[in-house]
């Protein structure tokens, strides 16, 4: 079995993905440019970051580091 981990894009917190733990996390998809075309990346935010930052989604976006080809 593959064990998946959720990785918070804001604080770097990692947590094993499970039915209970995963449900509290928030996720959003953003388009990313990888040089060969558009793709989508899924970003995650842990429950405590979502609590602390009402604008967690915008913070995740601004935290993205676009690849400079
Ligand atoms: Zn977090």
Image: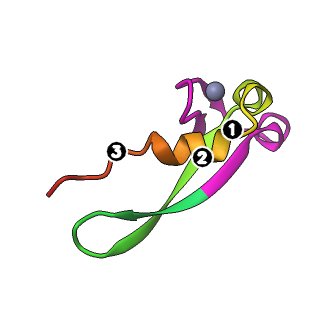
Of the numbered discs 1 and 2, the one sitting upstream in the chain is 1
Is residue 3 within the magenta segment? yes
Mark-to-mark CA distance, 3 and 2: 14 Å
Mark-to-mark CA distance, 3 and 1: 25 Å
Q: Residues within 10 Å of mark 2 (few under 14, many from 20)?
A: few
Question: Residue 58: which disc?
Answer: 2
Q: Residue at x 55, y 43 (%)?
A: 60
Q: Nearer the viewer, residue 52 or 48?
A: 52
Question: Residue 49: which disc?
Answer: none
Q: Nearer the viewer, residue 47 or 20?
A: 47
**Outermost residue to the bottom:** 37
Q: Quadrant of residue 37?
A: bottom left
Residue ID for mark 1? 17
Q: Is residue 24 left or right of residue 65?
A: right
Q: Residue at x 56, y 31 (%)?
A: 10
Is residue 23 within the magenta segment? yes
52, above or below 63, in the image: above
Question: Residue 65: which disc?
Answer: 3
Residue 57: % across, % down: 64, 47
Of the numbered discs 3 and 2, the one sitting upstream in the chain is 2
Tag 1's secondary structure?
A: loop
Q: Quadrant of residue 28?
A: bottom right
53, above or below 44, in the image: above
Q: Please report the bounds of the magenta region as a residue range.
A: 1-28
Q: Residue at x 54, y 36 (%)?
A: 9
Mark-to-mark CA distance, 1 and 2: 23 Å
Q: Is mark 1 within 8 Å of ligand 1?
A: no
Of the numbered discs 3 and 1, the one sitting upstream in the chain is 1
Tag 3's secondary structure?
A: loop
Q: Is mark 2 within 8 Å of ligand 1?
A: no
């Amino acid at each position: 079995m593959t064990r998946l981990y959720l990785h918070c894009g804001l604080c770097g917190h990692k947590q094993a993905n499970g039915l209970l733990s995963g449900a509290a996390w928030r996720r959003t998809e953003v388009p990313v440019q990888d040089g060969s075309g558009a793709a989508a990346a899924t970003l995650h935010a842990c429950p405590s970051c979502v609590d602390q930052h009402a604008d967690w989604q915008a913070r995740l976006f601004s935290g993205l580091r676009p690849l400079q080809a």
